[in-house]
Image (cartoon, rainbow, N blue to C red):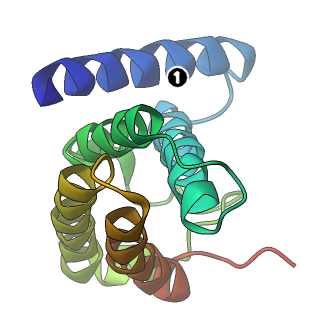
Amino acid sequence: MKTLSLIASGAAVLFSTMAFADSHADVDPAVTARQAHMQLYAHNLGILGGMAQGKIDYNPEMAQTAADNFLALANISQATYWPEGTAEGTKAKPEIWDNMDDFMSKADDLAFEAEAMADAAGTDLASLQGAMQGLGGTCSACHREYRIRDN
């Protein structure tokens, strides 16, 4: 099931990236790809976080699907998303390129926590909530250091 989710998520990223790229030809394709990837993270995290916060009724099947999707996304290599000089006009801080090893290690941390979420999400609400702390923490750790905050 996880392999199928990985393939489906990869295809979704590819097709959404292609559609977005066609309409934004002047944007670097790597930027387009990473932004699409982050939007897919946000979509699935929104489902999981909404359930964890009680804003969405807990549904084990939906939670498991979102967690599996998130895990698949976390296991797609982002190595080609971050070419030097692609911070301008994005939320990426230039510090990413000065600390690429640390930045990529945070991606590894995210994959680890995504695995924990995939193991917990469909079990029960309390398990999802427990896993959400670790997953949200890894997102926050990276955003704190490497993402320009929305005002």
What percent of the width, then of the height, locates residue 3?
Answer: 12, 24
Along the horizontal axis of the image, is 12 left or right of 80? right
Q: Relative to 70, say whether 18 is above or below.
A: above
Residue at coordinates 55% horizontally, 35% vertically from top-left?
A: 32
User: Quick check: 70 left or right of 2?
Assistant: right
Nearer to me, 128 or 92 = 128
Residue 94 is situated, as x and y percent measured from the top left of the image, at 51, 77
Which residue has dot 1 on it? 17
Q: Is residue 131 left or right of residue 1?
A: right
At 35% from the left edge and 56% from the top edge, which residue is drawn? 124
84 to 53, vertically: above or below: above
Q: Nearer the viewer, residue 146 or 89?
A: 146
SS at circle 1: helix
Q: Position of residue 103 (x, y in %)?
A: 30, 75
Is residue 63 or residue 20 the one in the foreground? 63
Amino acid found under the numbered disc labelled 1: Thr
Residue drawn at x 19%, y 63% as measured from the top left: 116
Q: Nearer the viewer, residue 112 or 150?
A: 112
**Residue 101 picture location, percent across and down:** 18, 77
- Few, some or many residues within 10 Å of mark 1 (<14, 14–19, 20+): many
Indicate left or right for 134 with 48 as reference.
Answer: left
Quadrant of image for the C terminus: bottom right
How many numbered discs sit on the rendered protein?
1
Up-down relation of residue 106 to residue 10 (above or below): below
Q: Vertical placement of 136 versus 39: above or below?
A: below
Quarter holding residue 4:
top left
In which quadrant will I find the N terminus?
Answer: top left
